[in-house]
Image (cartoon, helix red, strand yellow):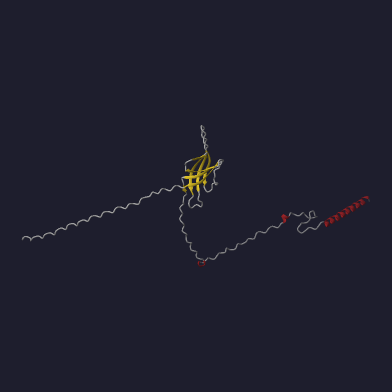
Amino acid sequence: MTDAASARRIAGVAALVAAVAGAAWVGLAQAQPPPSKSEGPPVGSLGEAPAAPSGLNAPEEAPPVEVIAPPPVTAPPVQAAEVAPAAPPAAKVAEEPAKAVIKRSRSDVAILQALDKVTAQSIRFEAEVGKPVRYKSLIFTVRACERSAPDEAVNDSIAYVVIASQPRGAPGKPTPAARQAFRGWMYASSPGLNPLEHPAYDAWLITCKAPPPAPVVAVPPPRPSPPKPKPAPTAPPPVPAAPKPAGPLPPT
């Protein structure tokens, strides 16, 4: 009696547990949202496996369609009548002959001017090309002196000057060595273009002295030659006398 009652009690409890578990599972299933079309079934649903990655289920691309190239288009030949005649060649312009280069005139003497900044003493002097000229403690040596050519835009004088600084030696003492103070071209029209930079002196080019004209030697006109004497008249040659006639021939 006891065993039968116990068995019925256990069976009733099992049926109750099964009913409660089924009701709970149905409520959980109804509470979940319905799956969308693009998504697979919810993970963990009863009787279904989890969805596979999207890359594995993607459809394969279709092979490219072979495009047939159109046949090449052949241009129709050009007729000779459709071609315009070529323009005649332009007449060649005769080239001008090269003009002769006009050289600058060179001078043997340059006219310079020096200024003592301490005493305000100024002096103008001539310096021959290649011969040194001293002014106080400066020694000027002109290497070249030129005047601009007639075809140049600016009429100017240009000289290449070398200036050395050498104080005079005191009596009984050796003369100090010369020190170069300036070397370069000087322009008469622009003294400040390449000036002498010295604390006590200043110098610039005035002009290049034109060489004196060559002396013109007067040539006396040629003396007229004396007239030739007329030859004396000659007597005509004598006329030979006519031969005398011969006598009668002797008889044979």
Is the residue 215 above or below the residue 170 in the image?
below
| Front-lying residue, 44 or 165 | 165
Mark count: 0
Horizontal side of residue 74 vs 216, given as left or right:
right
Q: Residue 199's image quarter? A: top right
- Most extreme residue toward the left is 251
- Most extreme residue toward the top is 172
Is the residue 69 above or below the residue 185 in the image?
below
Horizontal side of residue 177 vs 66, given as left or right:
left
- Please state, as top left, top right, bottom left or bottom right, where the C terminus lies in the image: bottom left
Horizontal side of residue 51 vs 92, given as left or right:
right
- Most extreme residue toward the bottom is 81
| Front-lying residue, 140 or 116 | 116
Q: Where is residue 235 in the image (x, y as percent from the top left)?
A: 19, 56
Q: Residue 238's image quarter? A: bottom left
Q: Where is residue 14 in the image (x, y as percent from the top left)?
A: 88, 52
| Front-lying residue, 66 or 209 | 209
| Front-lying residue, 224 or 189 | 224
Q: Position of residue 184 (x, y in %)?
A: 52, 44
Q: Where is residue 202 in the image (x, y as percent from the top left)?
A: 54, 43
